[in-house]
Structures are given as structure tokens and as C-alpha cells.
Image: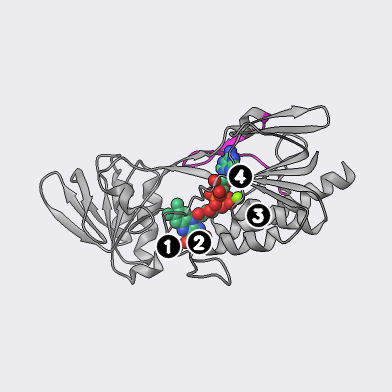
């Protein structure tokens, strides 16, 4: 029986694992290698690693983590989990079963992208969700915001700080007079034409009426989904965020199920690498406390 099984071995999971490894606990990390930012070649805003390749950040962390002999790494998907009398059992996709006294869920989220031809190919290269991550590199250029619903007002009102902003409504909602006034006050141009496709490099918006609007970059909200059903299987409470559900935790990253902790994107309404690392460290320390004191 392990002291802890950490499901998800990216930034949040590895950060939790590192604390537990250093507390000399026997831990298992299960990871199937689907980091949320795997589409991007540069990661920004994480102190000390600004502009680094996000894969290199994760791989460097993993090499340091695997230097601890009490860490076991399993490249497998955790398919399901259940509560035992004195802990938990996690089943791997490859048919393996693993028991532990505690579980840390660091499974991240999946981004459901708007269904527009050419968008998926540009995700993480010219189309983004987070202005703090990718806005600066657009050099105060031509920026598009693609509406998915009224929640995109928030994006549209932010982006003028990063460049000349056009808000593509794309029939996703109808702005009120008050919203149009807010957009005008921020200098946002409103484009109501329906989008046919995204094309070219870095990104042109091609409208149904044939017009083509060249941009340096585009921002849009995604429909987010917790990457794994394990939180639900274990009975953890979920919460509703603006783009999707996430695992509810307290300030020590404990879920509603005793012995189960959650961290990173899976456990917050919106997150980034720095927050995942911070959450993970907190979850690791809280898990250790649970192992020591019950
Ligand atoms: P993730 O990094 O998503 O990792 C979750 C891990 O869990 C994955 O390895 C996955 O395979 C694994 N997993 C999930 N379910 C299971 C399971 N059942 N069994 C086993 N393993 C499982 N943030 C920044 O700070 N700066 C940026 O520049 C930046 N750029 C981004 C660009 C793009 C295109 C996107 C989409 C996001 C970007 N982000 C950026 C956000 C950043 O990717 C996330 O905040 C961060 O990855 C969250 O870390 P995490 O550990 O919580 O989850
Ligand atoms: Mg993780």
C-alpha cells in the first residue's frame, strides 16, 4: 500500500509529489502525458521560467522528482477508483490495481474548442484563451476576440490592454446597449459577420460574406471539463465555474472526501502553471499532514 497515489503528473501533480517525496513517503504518480499546454511551444508568466518550453519545465521537474527512490512513476491512465476501508484503490487502464492511504487528484482539464474550421490547428500558436500567457508577444498588434457566449464580454474588455481589439460576435449572443457602450469605451471594434473559417499565418478570419480580416492573434473561451471521472467516482463535491465544473476544495486543497486532495486546473475555476505548482505544494503538505495525524 502506497502512502499516496497522485493521479496526474504534470505541474500540480509533480509539485504535490515533490513535497511527499521529501517527507520520505512512498508515493505512486500515474500520468498519461496529456498536459493541457502541450499545444504551445512557449510558457509565460511562471517566475524563473518565463518563455521556457512547457515540456522542458515538466521534464526537468520529473527528472528531479525521480531522483527520489521513494517515488514510483507509472505512465498509465487511472481509469477508475474506489474507497476501501482504510484508503483507496485506483485501477489503471492497463489493468493494474494500486492501493494507497490517500489520493491527490491533479488531472487538469480538457479544453472543448469552438467548432470553427482552422481553429484547432492554431490552438496554442495563434489562438489562445489566456492573455497573461500569450498577449504580450502579440506586440500591441491586431487582436481578435471570438465570442462563445456572453461570457466573452470579459475577454473583449480585457484585450485592449494588449492590442487593437476586434470582437467577433459570430452570432454567439446579442450585446445589450450597455455592453456596446462598455466595448466602445475600451475602443473595441465589434464585428457581427458570421465566421466561415480561420486561415493563413498567424491567423486571418474569413467571414461568410467573403471578407478577410488579418490578425496577429485571437482569444477565445473554451468549454472546460475535468479530465478524469475519478473525482466523481470517489464522491468529491464539484463546483461550477464560468467555463465548466471543477473539484471543490478547502484552502488546504482537501476535497469533500476525507483523504482525497485536489490541485491545479482540476480544482480551480481558472488556473495557470504558477497556480498549479502552488496548489500542488499545498496539497502535498496537506496530504502529509493527513498521513501523520489522520
Ligand atoms: P495539466 O498540466 O493539464 O496536467 C494534467 C496531467 O494529468 C496531464 O499530464 C494528464 O495526462 C494527466 N491526467 C489526467 N487524467 C489522468 C488520469 N485519469 N490518469 C493519469 N493521468 C491523468 N499557463 C501558464 O502559466 N503559462 C502559459 O503560457 C500557458 N499557456 C497555455 C497555453 C495553452 C494552449 C493552454 C491550453 C494552456 C496554457 N496554460 C498556460 C495553462 C496551463 O497549461 C495549465 O494551467 C497547467 O497545465 C495546469 O497544470 P495541471 O498540473 O493542473 O494540469
Ligand atoms: Mg498535474
Please give the range of residues in magenta.
234-251
Numbered disc in front, either 3 or 4: 3
Q: Are marks 4 and 1 in contact (CB under 8 Å)?
A: no
Relative depth, front residue between 276 and 25:
25
Give the image quarter of residue 262: top right
**Beta carbon of the mark 4 residue lies under 8 A of ligand 1:** yes
* Residue named by callout 2: 54
Disc 2 is placed on an element classified as: helix
**Beta carbon of the mark 3 residue lies under 8 A of ligand 2:** yes
Which label number is shown at residue 14? 3
Image height check: is 8 above or below 158?
above
Q: Earlier in the sequence, mark 2 or mark 1?
A: 1
Circle 4 crowding by C-alpha within 10 Å: few under 14, some 14–19, many from 20: many
Relative depth, front residue between 76 and 57:
76
Numbered disc in front, either 4 or 1: 1
Relative depth, front residue between 237 and 4:
4
Residue shown at the point (79%, 59%) measured from the top left:
22
Image-based side of 50 in relation to 115, left or right = right
Q: Earlier in the sequence, mark 2 or mark 3?
A: 3
* Residue named by callout 4: 267
Spatial CA distance of label 4 from label 2 is 20 Å
Amino acid at each position: 500500500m502506497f502512502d499516496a497515489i497522485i493521479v496526474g503528473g504534470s505541474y500540480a501533480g509533480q509539485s504535490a509529489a515533490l513535497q511527499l517525496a521529501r517527507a520520505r513517503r512512498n508515493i505512486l504518480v500515474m500520468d498519461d502525458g496529456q498536459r493541457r499546454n502541450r499545444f504551445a511551444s512557449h510558457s509565460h508568466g511562471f517566475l524563473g521560467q518565463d518563455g521556457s518550453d512547457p515540456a522542458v519545465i515538466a521534464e526537468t521537474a520529473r527528472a528531479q522528482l525521480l531522483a527520489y527512490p521513494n517515488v514510483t512513476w507509472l505512465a498509465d491512465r487511472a481509469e477508475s477508483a474506489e474507497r476501501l476501508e482504510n484508503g483507496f484503490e485506483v485501477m489503471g487502464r492497463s489493468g493494474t490495481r494500486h492501493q494507497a492511504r490517500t489520493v491527490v487528484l491533479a488531472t487538469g482539464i480538457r479544453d472543448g474548442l469552438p467548432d470553427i474550421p482552422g481553429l484547432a490547428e492554431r490552438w496554442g500558436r495563434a489562438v489562445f484563451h489566456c492573455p497573461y500567457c500569450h498577449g504580450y508577444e502579440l506586440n500591441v498588434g491586431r487582436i481578435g476576440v471570438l465570442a462563445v457566449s456572453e461570457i466573452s464580454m470579459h475577454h473583449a474588455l480585457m484585450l485592449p490592454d494588449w492590442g487593437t481589439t476586434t470582437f467577433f460576435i459570430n452570432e454567439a449572443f446579442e450585446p445589450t446597449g450597455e455592453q456596446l457602450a462598455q466595448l466602445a469605451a475600451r475602443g473595441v471594434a465589434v464585428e457581427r459577420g458570421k465566421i466561415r473559417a480561420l486561415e493563413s499565418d498567424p491567423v486571418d478570419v474569413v467571414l461568410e460574406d467573403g471578407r478577410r480580416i488579418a490578425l496577429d492573434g485571437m482569444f477565445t473561451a473554451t468549454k472546460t471539463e475535468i479530465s478524469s471521472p475519478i473525482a466523481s467516482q470517489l464522491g468529491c463535491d464539484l463546483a461550477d465555474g464560468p467555463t465548466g465544473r471543477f473539484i471543490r476544495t478547502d484552502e488546504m486543497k482537501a476535497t469533500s472526501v476525507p483523504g482525497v486532495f485536489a490541485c491545479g486546473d482540476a480544482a480551480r475555476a481558472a488556473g495557470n502553471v504558477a497556480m498549479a505548482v502552488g496548489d500542488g505544494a499545498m496539497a502535498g503538505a496537506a496530504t502529509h499532514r493527513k498521513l501523520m495525524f489522520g
